[in-house]
Image (spheres, coloured by chain):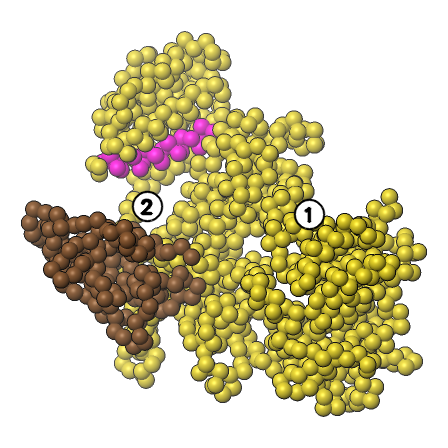
Amino acid sequence: MDDLIVEFITETNESLAAIDLQLVGLEQNPNDKNLLGSIFRLMHTIKGTCGFLGLPRLETCAHRAENVMGRFRDGTLQVTPAYVTLIFESIDRIKMIMGELEANGKEPEGNDMDLIEKLDAVYEGRDTTGAAPAAAHGAAPASAEIDPLQALFDSTPGPADMVPNYVPAPVEAAPAPAPVAAAPAPVAAKPADDHGAKESSVASQTLRVNVDVLENLMTMVSELVLTRNQLLQIQRNSKGSEFGTPLQRLNHVVSDLQEGVMKTRMQPIGAAWSKLPRIIRDLSNELGKKIDLVMEGEETELDRQVLELIKDPLTHMVRNSGDHGIEKPSDRAAAGKPETGKIILRAFHEGGHIIIQIKDDGKGLNTERIKQKAIEKGIATAEQLAAMPKKQIHMYIFDAGFSTAEKVTSVSGRGVGMDVVRTNIEKIGGTIDLLSEEGQGSTFTIKIPLTLAIVSALIVEVAGEKYAVPQLAVQELVMGSEGGENKIEYINGTPVFRLRETLLPLVNLQAMLKLPEDKSASERVGRKNLYIIVTKVGDYVFGILVDRVFDTEEIVVKPMARMLQSIELFSGNTILGDGSVILILDPTGVAKASGEIQVASTDKSAAEEHAIRGTRTSLLLFSTGDGIPKAVPLALVARLEDVDISKIEESGDQMLIQYRDTLMPLVKFDPDMPLNEKGTQPTLVFSDGTRSMGLMVAEIIDIVEDIINVQINSDRTGYLGSTIIRNKATDIIDVGSFLKGAYKDWFKDHGEDDFDREDMKRLRRVLVVDDSPFFRNMLSPLLSVAGYDVTTAENPKRALELAEKGQFFDIIVSDIEMPEMSGFEFVEAVRKQGPWQNTPMVALSSHATKNDIERGMSLGFTKYVAKFDRDTLLNAISSTLAEQRHTEAA
Amino acid sequence: MSLSGEVTKFQKRRAGDVDEGPQMTQFLSITVGGQMFGIPILQVQDVLRQQTVTHVPLAPPEVAGALNLRGRIVTAINVRRRLGLDNLPEGSKTMSVVVEHEHELYSLIIDTVGDVLSLQSKGFEQVPPTMDTTWRDIATGIFRLENQLMVVVDVSRLLQHSVH
C-alpha cells in the first residue's frame, strides 16, 4: 500500500479516537467551546486530507459532519444528544470506510446518502426530529475567539502533529454551500495558522518513528547487552588485564544505552484507555444505565509490549463493571446510592511494577451465587467453601467457564472473559487481585512488571541444571539444611522452614520439574545444605529449594517457543554470557504448581494408591534418653518447639509454661528423663484448637516418610506398638495417654453450641471403618485428641455386626477402598435398613473425582472428605454433627 | 536479527535456480531410523552438527530442548521420538536440520543428512494407507527413487506434537 495512505490511516485513526473521546465529553458538556472547536478542527483536517488524497466517500462524510460541527461551534445550532449521536454515527461510518481502505487499499463501493441526508437536514435546519432549532444566531462571533494556545492545549498530540502537514490543503478544499459555512472557513484558517506557528515548536519536540525501527533498535541493544555480558564473564575469569578499565566503561555505557532505549518503548497507559469513554457511553445507552468513567494516572508509562497485552483485558473488565457491577438507576436510587454509577480507573507506579485499579461502586460480587456455581461445577465442595474466606471464594470468577451472570448479553456474561483476562495478565508476569463488598462495589487490582525485555535474574542450579529466577520476585536468600539449627521441617507432609517469626512453605524445585536427583551432588561432602530462595507472589510468600546459587545477571528475556508456552513454570528463556540457553522460572507458575502438587499426590493410580496408602506415613522420630528411638505420627503434632528451661513453672506436680497467651501443661515423656540444666528442651506440641500440651523429649531426631510395617502391641500404656525404622526398633507412642496426663479432662467435648450443656456431658461417639490397621490406629488418637469417643472396625462387615448388636454412634467415618466390601457398598447397606439409617456418614478417601463424590453423596454419604488432612477431617466431622444437632432440635 | 545478514548456501540456491526444469522440486534428503525422508528445500534454513541442547523440564517428550543458534533460541525436536522410534544408542552422533515455521526456528534432530535432490513432480505418489499412522500423519507423499523410497515430510505437521 502506498506509504502516504498508510500514514494517512495511522494519523486519521488517531484523530478519530480523539474525536470519540471529545464527543463523549461534549455530550456531558454541550456548551464547552474548547471541545467544539477541537472536534471541528479534527473533522476539518480529516476532510481536507481525504480531499487531498482523492478519497471521495470519506471526504464527503467528513465534510458533511464538519458542517454540522461548524454550526455547533458557531453557536447557531444547539448541541443535543440526538445530534451528538448523529455525529457518532458519522464517525463510525468513517471508521468503517477506513477499515475497508486499510484492508483493500481503496474505498469500498457505495455511497453514504442515508447519512448525508441526515447530516444535511440537521445542518440546514430542516431536521424536525432533532431538538432545538438554530436559535442562537447571535452567538456566532464567539467562535472567532478561540484562543490558539487554549486550542493547542486541548488537542491531543497526534492530530496536533498532523496539522502543520495538512493545513494548506483544507483551506482551499472547503466547498461552503450555505452562508454559515463561509464564516467558519476563514475562521478556521486563522486558528489553524496560529496553530501552525505554535505547533511547530511542539512538533519539533516529538518525532514520529516507525515501530519497527524501534524494535530493531531494541533487538540490537539486547544483542549488545548479551555481548557485554559475555565480555564481562571472560574478564571475570581471567586475572586482571588491560581490558579491565575500558570494559568497565563499556559496561556503564551499555547500561545507560539500554535504559535509554527502554524509555523509547514506554507509552502512557492513557493510550490503552482512550477507547473506553466511548465504550462506556455506548454501554450506558444500551443498558439504560448512568455511568461515569473517571480516569486517573493516564500519564503513567509502561512498556509498549505490555500495553498491547493488557489493552483487551482492561477493556473487558471495564465493560464487566458497567454490565454486571453498576446497577440500573432505579435500583441504585432504591439502595440509597446516587443514580449515576462510577467506574474509576487508576494507574500508578510501585516498585518495579505498574498498578492498575478498576473500581466501581456497583452491587459487588454475590458470594452466595459464586458458591453455588462452584458447587455446580464441581470445583469445590460445600464444606471447603464454608471454610474459605470471602476473598478466596471471589477468586473463582477467574475460573474458565465461570459466569454467574443470569443472562448472557452481547457485552459480557459468556463466561469466557475473566479466565482469559487472568491468563493474559499472568503471561506477562503480572497478578490480579480482587476485593468486593456486596452492595458497595468491587475493586480489581492488576500488578504488572514494568518491562518484559531485559530483567535482572538470579542464576540458580537444581539437579545439575541452571535456571534463572527474576530478581524482582526474590525477597531474600537463606541457607537451610537437613539437620541442625536451620533445618527444614515438615508439617503435614509439606516441607517448611522457620524464617524468623514465620513458617515458610517450601517448594522442592527438583521434584516439581521432575528432574532426576544429581547423584554426584549427593556424594559431595557437606551436601546437606540447601539454598532457599524466599519468593513472593501477590501476598503469598514461599521458599524455593535449590542446590546452588550463582550471580545475579542481566538477561534478555526471550519468550518460550509456542509449543512450550503452556508450561506454566517458565516465563521465557535466555542466553547466558557463556552461550548456553537457560530457562526462566515463573514464580507465579511455581506458586500455583506447589498448591496443586498436594492434590496431584493423591491422584495416583488406584493400584499404587491402594498398596501404599495404608502403610505410608510420616512419623516424627525423637529420643528420650534411653537409647530407644520413639516415633509419633506427624499428623498429630501441631508444632515443634524449643521450650526455654528457665521459663518452666511448677504448680503442684504439674509443669507449666506460658505459651501464646495461655498456660500450657508440660509432660515429660519419661518421668525419669532428665531435663536439660539450662537452655531449651525440645517439645512436641499437641493441640485441639484452644488447648495445647507440650510433650518434652530429649532430642528430635528426624522426620521419616516411608512404607512402615507396624507391630501393634497395646500392652504397654503409652505405646501403640513398634516398628523398624532405619534398621532400628522404634516405639510408636500413644499420644492419648499423655494427653490424659496433662489434662485430666482432656477428653471432655468442647462442643460448638454454648446452649447444649446436656449434650456436652456425653462424648460424641465416632465409628472408624478402615481396613488398614495402621490407619485405624492413627485416626484413633487423632479423633480422641479432638475429644471424640472412638471405636474402630476393620471392615464394613464388622461394623454392620456392631449395628446388629445395637451399638449406636453419632457419626461414622469410612474409607472407600476396602477389599471385601467397599465404602460405597457399605453406605448403601447402612442406608437401606438398620439402626444407622439416619447416622451421618463421612467418606474418607484419596479418590476424589467429581464422579466419586457424586456417587458417594448419592449413595448416602453426608460428606466426602477428599484428602487426609487433620483439619479438614475434624471440620467435616464437627460441622456434620452440628448440622445433625440442629435438625434434631428442630 | 543476527541471521538477517547471513546467506546460507540454501538461501543462495533459493534465490537462484530453484526449479531446474518445468516440474522439478528440490528436497534435502535425510535419514531417520534407516528410512529416507525429504524436506522441501525452501523450508530448510540450516544444517547443523551435534549441538548442546538445554533440557526443558515438563516439555512434551519429543521436545529435546532448546539451543542457541547464533543468538536465536531454537527449539530442538527429537524426530525419532516424534516418529515413535527408539533413540540412538548413547553417544551416537546426530545431525540437525533447522526449519522455520510461523516465525519460529526449530532444529529437527535426525540421524544423517544426505544430498539435495531435484525430483520430477510427476514422480510424487500418495502415501500408502498401510503406513503407520504417525508416519502417515507427517508425510505428504513419497518419491520412488532408484534404490529406495523417500517419504516427503510435512514440516508443520511434524511440529504439531502428538497428543498424549
Please, which chain is the residue tagged with disc 1 on? A
Q: Is residue A174 above or below residue A571?
A: above
Label 2 packing within 10 angstroms: few (<14), some (14-19), many (20+): few
- In front: A449, or A883? A883
The residue depicted at 18 percent of the width and 49 percent of the height is B125
Q: Determine which residue is flagged by label 2.
A: A205
Tell me the kind of residue under disc 1.
Answer: Ser
Q: Colour of chain A?
A: yellow
Q: Colour of chain B?
A: brown
Q: Is residue A784 visible?
A: yes
Q: At which x and y percent is residue A679?
A: 74, 86
> Which of the 4 quarters of the picture holds residue A538?
bottom right
Q: CA distance from mark 2 to mark 1?
A: 73 Å
> Which of the 4 quarters of the picture holds residue A344?
top right
Q: Determine which residue is flagged by label 1.
A: A858
Magenta-colored stretch includes residue A206: no
- In front: A470, or A229? A470
The boundaries of the magenta stretch are A4-25
Quadrant of the drawing holding the C terminus of chain A: top right
- In front: A102, or A180? A102
The residue depicted at 24 percent of the width and 51 percent of the height is B127
Secondary-structure class at tag 2:
loop
Q: At which x and y percent is residue A453?
A: 38, 58
Please, which chain is the residue tagged with disc 2 on? A
Q: At which x and y percent is residue A159?
A: 34, 35
The residue depicted at 12 percent of the width and 54 percent of the height is B119
Q: Is residue A850 above or below residue A597?
A: above
Tell me the kind of residue under disc 2.
Answer: Gln
A522 relative position to B28: left or right: right
Secondary-structure class at tag 1:
helix
